[in-house]
Amino acid sequence: MNLGEIEQSLREAGLTPRGAFHPAAGDDLPPLAAQTPARTLVLAGHAGPRMWRAFDAARAGGAMTLDEWSARVLSELAARLGARAVFPFERPYLPFQRWALRAEACHPSPLGLLIHPDYGLWHGYRGALLFAAAIALPPPERRASPCASCADRPCLSACPAGAFDAAGYDIAACARHLACMPEPACMDSGCLARQACPVGRDYRYAPAQARFHMQAFRLNHVQAGDRKAGKTQRT
Ligand code: B12
Ligand code: SF4
Ligand code: SF4
């Protein structure tokens, strides 16, 4: 099994390969099994319309959440490839953003989301496959952060609730705004701070996907009033 074959399997399942790395001390990977450390991590996510099409078709056959779809697709793939699948919604949380910084040309953005030079802020992670073998990998791709040359930082001033400042993301301010009626524009177009970023505009979510993510976010973290108590995030 080589990396190209694994990446092709991810694409066929509706996912986007998001890089891979050989774990080192401090990467905090769970083992495959007792006494069996993972020697390769392959990251799976979404960027562009492929995942939404696959998920939307699958849920037409029976209601399911995006987390359930991710778990089904990646667990089947893991069984076929002899890997272990792990997920961003598992508790305790696994450090997916830290892994992404190791796996591909992503950088932290002022919004807390990672920014990718091509996808901008319009991407996410659906899971990772852990392999016992040290699979041959290409040298890591290193590209500059788009934020480093973005003098105006429009993402920081676009939120109508003023949820972003130098101190970070004010979850409560965002939650209060999303609970307003009539519904704020973010519910239809997706987070306006994210929309304001000039990078990766071709990868912006289509309206149905943007609304789906915002509804899931509001349901789990706003309406439920349960931002601390462990509801599953369905991004
Ligand atoms: C808990 C959580 C949240 C919480 C709290 C975030 C916080 N302040 O810590 C809340 C509910 C607020 C949240 C919000 C969002 N989140 Co969130 N979240 C997570 C989750 C499940 C766990 C984070 C964690 O504690 N990790 C454990 C530590 C050990 O991992 P780490 O990599 O070392 O930690 C990093 C993060 O904590 C990050 N971080 C710190 N502060 C913030 C603030 C924000 C807003 C984010 C996104 C990240 C972030 O910095 C750390 C170092 O890199 C991750 C999935 C995961 N397993 O990581 C998704 C995750 C970080 N979220 C994600 C997303 C997309 C969102 C939303 C955009 C949801 C949406 N609407 O679609 C929003 C952002 C706000 C908005 N207005 O839309 C994506 C980010 C993808 C990317 N491009 O980077 C992730 C990776 C999930 C995924 N499936 O891809 N999230
Ligand atoms: S608007 Fe500029 S600073 Fe903000 S995320 Fe996009 S590139 Fe980075
Ligand atoms: S979803 Fe709307 S209210 Fe929340 S941070 Fe984004 S722009 Fe602000």
Image: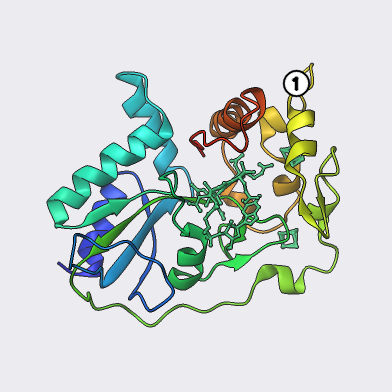
- Taking the spot 47% from the left edge, 64% from the top edge, the residue there is 100
Q: Quadrant of ligand 2?
A: bottom right
- Between residue 146 and residue 76, name the one nearer to us: 76
- In the image, residue 127 above or below residue 19: above
**Residue 101 visible in this rendered orientation of the protein:** yes
- Between residue 132 and residue 4, name the one nearer to us: 132
- Between residue 95 and residue 162, name the one nearer to us: 95
The total number of labels drawn is: 1
- Taking the spot 18% from the left edge, 72% from the top edge, the residue there is 133
Residue 18 vs residue 215: left or right? left
Q: Which residue is mark 1?
A: 183
Instruction: Identify the amino acid type marked 1.
Output: Glu
Image spot of residue 124 (x, y percent): 50, 50
- Secondary structure at badge 1 equals loop
Residue 188 vs residue 91: left or right? right
- In the image, residue 51 above or below residue 151: above
- In the image, residue 14 above or below residue 42: above
- Taking the spot 27% from the left edge, 61% from the top edge, the residue there is 130
